Every structure is written in structure tokens, then in C-alpha cells.
Image (cartoon, rainbow, N blue to C red):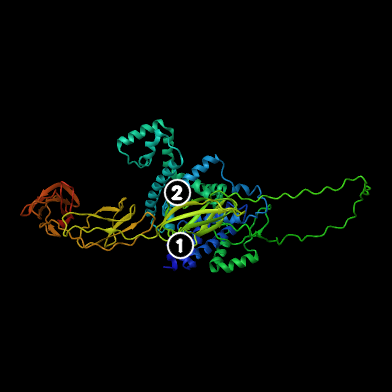
Amino acid sequence: MRGGSNLEHRGDSTLVQLTRSGDSRAFAVLWQRHASAGAAAAQQFASIADPEDLVSEAYLRILRAVQGGGGPTEAFRPYLYRTIRNVALGWIDKTSPISLEVAPQLEDPDGDPENLALERTITVRAFQTLPERWQTVLWYLEVEGLQPAEAAPLLELSPNAVSALAVRAREGLKKAWLQAHVSHLPVPPDCQWTTERMGQYTRGVLTPPARSRFDRHLKNCTRCSTLVDEVNNLSGWLAGILLPVTVGGAAGAGLLAQLRAGHPASVAAAKLGASRITVARSAVIAGAGIVAVAAIATGAWAVSLPPALPVSTPVAADPGRDASPSAEPTAVPSPTAAAPTDPAPTDPAPTDPPPPASPADPAPVAPAPPVVAQPDVTAPAIPVLLDPAAGALTNNASPVFTGTGEPGAHVDVQVTDPSTGMLSTIAATTVDPAGNWVALTTVALPDGQHSISTSQVDPAGNRSPADVRVIVVDTVATPPQVDALPAQPMLFLPDITGSAEPGATVSLRDDLGAVLGTTLAGTDGRWTISLPDPARDGATLSATQTDPAGNVSSWSAATPQLIFDRPGIPSPAPDAAIPSTSGSTVVEIELDGHEGMQVQVFVDGVSTGNVHTLEAAPIVRVTPPLADGAHTVGVRYFDPGTGAAGSVYTVAFVIG
């Protein structure tokens, strides 16, 4: 579906896919949806460039990337923030010193650098091991501070579904953070038992004896007590860590302050140049290539820099990287600058006559031989690959690789061919002046495991060793299997069982579309859902799964129809009229069915609390006194030994 108002209700990932297929209206919706947030982020770089120009250029680069098969896959807004930051840094004239007004925007917040780097590394790595769908919902709820109802249209989910997804994502983040923390920090022997069970403790699933032992340890261990507090408050840290990683240190802190405190600057940034941004949006969408050439030729994209920096026209580049260092920006002269003029002629100042030459002057000394610079033959360090993490599972066949490296170095991301062992480049970029890089995949990776090698080549041509890690691409989820149903007709409601991908979320629905239950498949892929009473014959069932990578399968084929063997109620007859006895009428109920079977009786949907054994002939029971009006009586087979219950047969009648 590509047209009309329906686009307003589509999620960001769907809009990106529609843009990739050529629907410019989908990109217009993305522009309208995120332009205000982008303006707030661009305001953090106002000392480098005009925020309006930054937003327009960022959207232009994203549009080109998407049309070329790249661009964002899930959370659009952090991708926009990162692109705005890279545009701003790429527009700095690298030949001029950065003024003191600009420098704070490029620095990290104050703090212990060692501890800050460690916490960032652990938290970012834990966050990046999560499925992209979980990362997206945590970004919008925990980083942006949106309510589920505000994030729902961005994810193309209902608010309740956003809340449920956020619960799973927060729990997954806790598990991943604990694992990353244990992997990077030594664990004292006395804390080994507690550390291994910390995840179970925070989820409240330890047995009472184990919990008592855990609590006793916490009373005497500051380390573990602090770790428990940290993991319980983990979601609250995300904004303070992820925003600086995405848009830079002080810029991230400034944006966080606006998001959290409703600072007046946030309102101003959100409304910044609305009319001019709208005009630029229309131009970009109408013809990205032509507009870019015309804009550069006329200076429309010129950057407003502080007085210490010259105004220059940036060269358009991929959103994930800055302009190449070799492509120097072209200076744009100011229309108000005065033309240089020759100085007024003046009389030369009188000078003393030169001294006479002395015959005793020494002979000229031969100049010293020139100093020959030694070539740089030192290989740079291995570049840091932040995303995707080692062992990451993704449903994006063209993942975006991000990391840090030596400013100006060329980064190659390569995949190993399992049959030949040969490396082929799938993404490449240049490290920006701040030491960050983003590389877009140029070829789609097939489903399965892939060995990824990432290295960098410094400006002298030295290549670093490679970071080698395995990632798993999974883009397809097949329908789960539903096991055969018990023989028909059934006396008792069955448990519906089947197979799916281990860890997948399985949902069961009937032929009317009602969801009957949801569960997680175990490590062996098996799942079970207890069937609620359909209260009718002829229903069919089907199942779907959402696998750990976030792929949603189609619904499985429908099962055979469900047929139940229910006990009967010969009297009263359906819709019978029962004479009233002063508004407190006792009604005789006949029950029949399989001799020797036990049944439960319900009056107006409430169990009487008794179990009755059927005989060869119908048995008679009486109701409690009933008021005049409509009533129901129901009966079902029941096994007190196992708790198994059948489908209820119900008769309605009227008293009065």
C-alpha cells in the first residue's frame, strides 16, 4: 500500500522500505515525523553550521542512501542524529583551528575517563547485542522519553504492544548487561555464586533458600549490592550513555537536557526555520540529484560558521561518513566582503647607508644537508567495531557497521567466503576527525553465520590487524508447527502443543481471529498453550511466531475443526419461562451425560462449588433461590484428580 493517508499510520521501517522502492511520499512522512527532533539535535552544532542547513543536508544524504539500498532499518531518529553530527563535523574546515566556541561541542562530558569509557563500553555492547526491535523501543522510551502511545506509530504497533515489547527489551538488556559486566571485570571468588545468579535474583525467580543466601551475601558485600542497584536502574542510564555516543559528548548532554527538562531551547529548536525546512524538504524529495548540484552551484548549502572559520560549501557524502579528507571544501566569498584595494602611496622612510664590506668577512658556510623524514611504517591499532557486536543476531541483511578508529584512516569491512576463505569487502568508509566511523553495507548478506573482518589503513598506507567476529543474519521466520489434536469429539479442553524456533514468541488464534494465547518456545523449540473454552464446535486454530531476530512468520495452516462432547441439560429447555415464586425461585435442573463421569454446574456463570456424578438416568439438582429475570445454567465434565475440564454447555431461561 503506497498512497494516501495510510502512510501516516505506517511505522518508520515500513516507510524506509517504501522509499527504497521509489515512493517519495513515504520519505515526506519521515521528514514531517522527525524534522523537529532533528532540528533540536542540529541546534547542538549551531556554533559550527546553521541548524536548518544541517537538517536539510542530513535528510538529503539519508534519502540518497535509502535510494541506493542502504540507510536505516529500524530506529530512524538515532540514525538522523548521527547523520546530522557527521554533516556538522564534515563541514569544519580542517585547515583552520577550531575556535574555543566550537571545541566544547566535540569533547566528552567531564568525568573519570577510565570509568566513563568502561561503563560506556559495557552498556553500549550490551545494548547492541539486543534484537534491533528491542533497541528501537528502548531508544524511543528510555532515551527520547516518549510514552508508549507516542512511540506506537513509529513502530507500527498499538500502545499496549509497545509496552509489552518494552518489558521484554528491558529484561533482555539486564541480562546482556550482566553478561558484559562479568566478561569485562574480574569476579572475586566469594562473589562467584552470587554473580552467576544475579539475573535470576533481579527477576525474582530464585528459590526461597537461594534468595535467603543471596540476601545474606548482599548485607556484607558492597560490590554485589551496588551491582544489583545498577542493573535495576539500568534503563535510566541509557539516555546519558547512548546520546553522547550518537551525537557526541557535550552535544549529547545538551540534547539530553532538552529532552528531559523541556528546556526553552528545545522548543525553539523544534520550531527552527519550519517554513524554510519545509521548502527544502519538497526540493529534496522532488529530485535529490538535481537539487544537490544546483544547491552547490548557487551556494544554497553554504554553512554559517563562527568568525574563526571560513564559510564553505560542503561536498555531499554518504550519511554514515564525513567528506573525504582529500576533497577540500570550496571557499564561498561573502557577497558583502569588500574587494581588496592597493594601499595609498607613501614616501619611503629614510634609511641609513649600508656599512662598507669588510675584507675580513669569513667564507660562506655550506648549508646543512636536509633532514630526510623517516617513512611511517607503524601499523595503526585494530579499529573498534561497536555495532554489530560479536555473535549478534540481526534480521537486517545489510547491517550498518559503526565504530571508532584513527582519524583520517580508511576502514574496510570484509566477509570471509566459507568455501574459499577469501575476503571480500562489503562496506568501507573514512574515520571522521572525532575518531568515529559508519560504514553502509553495499551487498546483502544471505541468512546464516558470517565471519566479519574489520581493519583500517592509515594515511601512510599501513594496514592494522583485523577485528574478526561472527554475526548471524536471520531474515525469515517460517510458521510454527502445531501438533495433531486429540481424537474428536473431546471430553476435556486440550493443551495445544507444537514446535518453533528456540526462544521465539508463539501466538495462537482461532478462525474468528481471536488470539487465544501467547508463549515462548523453549530451548528445544517446544511450546504449549492451554486452550481456553471456545464454547462452540467447529473452531479451527493456527499459530505464528516472532523469532529472536524479530522476524514475524505467516500463520500456519488451520487445524481440523474442534468438536467437543459436552454433558446435557434436558430441563429447563432453552429459553424456557419459569413461573416466579415471589422473586425467590428455586429451579430444578436435570443433568445427563456419560454414566460415572463427574460434572461441575454454573449458575449465571458462577460455579456452585460442587461436583456431581452422573448416572444412567438424568440426575436432578436445584439452584439457589433466584430473582425474577434472565438467568443461565451451564454444565461441563470435570476431573477432580487432574483438574481437567471440558467445554461448557449452557441453557438460558427466564423467571417471571
Labels 2 & 1 near each other (Cβ < 8 A)? no
Q: Which residue is mark 2?
A: 127
Secondary structure of the residue carrying numbered label 2:
helix
Q: Judge from the rendering whether residue 429 lies leftward or rightward of residue 236; answer left or right.
A: right
Front position in the image: 175 or 62: 175
Q: Residues within 10 Å of mark 2 (few under 14, many from 20)?
A: many
Instruction: Give percent across and percent down for residue 474.
Output: 39, 58
Q: Judge from the rendering whether residue 578 lies leftward or rightward of residue 89; answer left or right.
A: left
Front position in the image: 612 or 13: 13
Q: Quadrant of residue 320?
A: bottom right
Q: Which residue is mark 1?
A: 444
Q: Quadrant of residue 89?
A: bottom right
Residue that protrudes farthest toward the left in the picture: 617
Instruction: Give percent across and percent down for residue 4.
Output: 44, 68
Q: Residues within 10 Å of mark 1 (few under 14, many from 20)?
A: some
Front position in the image: 505 or 602: 505
Q: Amino acid at mark 2?
A: Phe
> Is residue 416 visible to us here?
yes
Decide which of tag 2 and tag 1 comes sooner along the chain: 2
Instruction: Give percent across and percent down for residue 175.
Output: 40, 45
Q: Judge from the rendering whether residue 128 lies leftward or rightward of residue 93; answer left or right.
A: left
Instruction: Give percent across and percent down for residue 547.
Output: 36, 56
In which quadrant of the rendered image does the C terminus lie? bottom left
Q: Quote the CA–CA distance across marks 2 and 1.
A: 24 Å
In which quadrant of the rendered image does the N terminus lie? bottom left
Secondary structure of the residue carrying numbered label 1:
loop
